[in-house]
Image: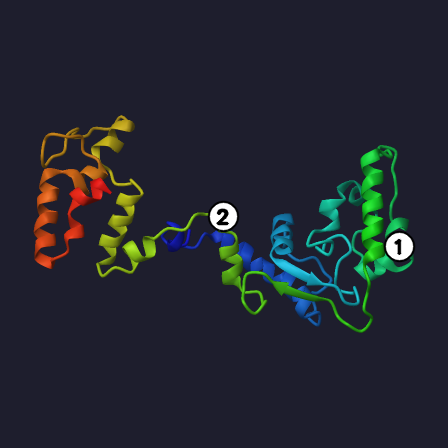
Amino acid sequence: MPTSQGGLGVLNLDKFTRALRLRWLWHEWKDQTKPWVGLETPCDEIDRNLFAASTNITIGDGNTVRFWESAWIGGRRPKDLMPLVYTISKNRGKSLRQGKEDDAWVQDLKLDSQSSITVDLVEQLVALWEAVRNVHLDVGEPDQITWKFTNNGHYTASSAYHAQCCGVPSTNFNSLIWKAWAPGKCKFHAWLIIQNRVWTSDRLATRGWQNNGCCPLCRRETETALHLVATCRYTKRIWHLISAWVGYQQMDPTEWEEA
């Protein structure tokens, strides 16, 4: 995860490679002169779902917008809104213009022996019919696409990577740890303490491993990360001396406990 979201800032390779693969889908829109456009790209369904959720489409002539795969119905794809109709469609590679002309998308619908007409299928058919009827194509005006996660609307691998981290709460670790003046190993140790990932006696005990039990400094309380850095009487003495030295009273751990 990014450091602003509590992580170490080390790239998640799965998320990063997915962000890079979205470049193929972006160039299918922006540069159709590339020789591979129209061929199968190395993108899976998750890649395409992320791309659809990360972009806004403005319909022009309908030549670039995919009838089933592009999010042209209120920012959502027909294959997601009308999955039953999508299932019985036998030609899913048409553009919006090709599907709209002479209602070609209707001619592509074929029921097999295992399919049946249901109320849900009819409702989805009617909804798609109305959506297609309400679309107006502007001949001579190309379709446009914009990327949601950049100010200029252009795709970047960095924004595609961070888009996959959306929904994770932000932290103040950047100002609290990473931007502070200290050696890197001290910052990393502080991060481990906040995450409660240092091998103190309480964590060792939960795994049934040998441990000291009590704090080796005060010999009174169980050794925990919080106890070692704030509540131990020896630690408090050190913080009092440092706070007196630098003239910064908020370093008093007693005030931390009250807060």
Res. 248 image quadrant = bottom left
Q: Is residue 233 above or below residue 211?
A: below
Q: Earlier in the sequence, mark 2 or mark 1?
A: 1
- CA–CA distance in space, label 2 to label 1: 40 Å
Q: Is residue 72 left or right of residue 26?
A: right
**Does any portion of residue 109 appear in the rendered image?**
yes
User: Which residue does the image show at 78% across and 65% down from the upper left?
Assistant: 63
Report the quarter where the C terminus lies.
top left
The residue wearing badge 1 is 104
Q: Is residue 122 left or right of residue 201?
A: right
Res. 175 image quadrant = bottom left
* Amino acid found under the numbered disc labelled 2: Gly
Instruction: Return the x and y of residue 16 as percentages of the image width and height.
Output: 50, 56
Q: Are marks 2 and 1 in contact (CB under 8 Å)?
A: no
- How many neighbours does mark 1 have within 10 angstroms: few (below 14), some (14-19), or many (20 or more)? some
- How many neighbours does mark 2 have within 10 angstroms: few (below 14), some (14-19), or many (20 or more)? few
Is disc 2 placed on a helix, strand or loop?
loop
* Amino acid found under the numbered disc labelled 1: Ala
Instruction: Return the x and y of residue 181 as percentages of the image width and height.
Output: 22, 61
Q: Nearer the viewer, residue 177 or 239?
A: 239
Res. 29 image quadrant = bottom right
Is disc 1 placed on a helix, strand or loop?
helix
Which mark identifies residue 167? 2
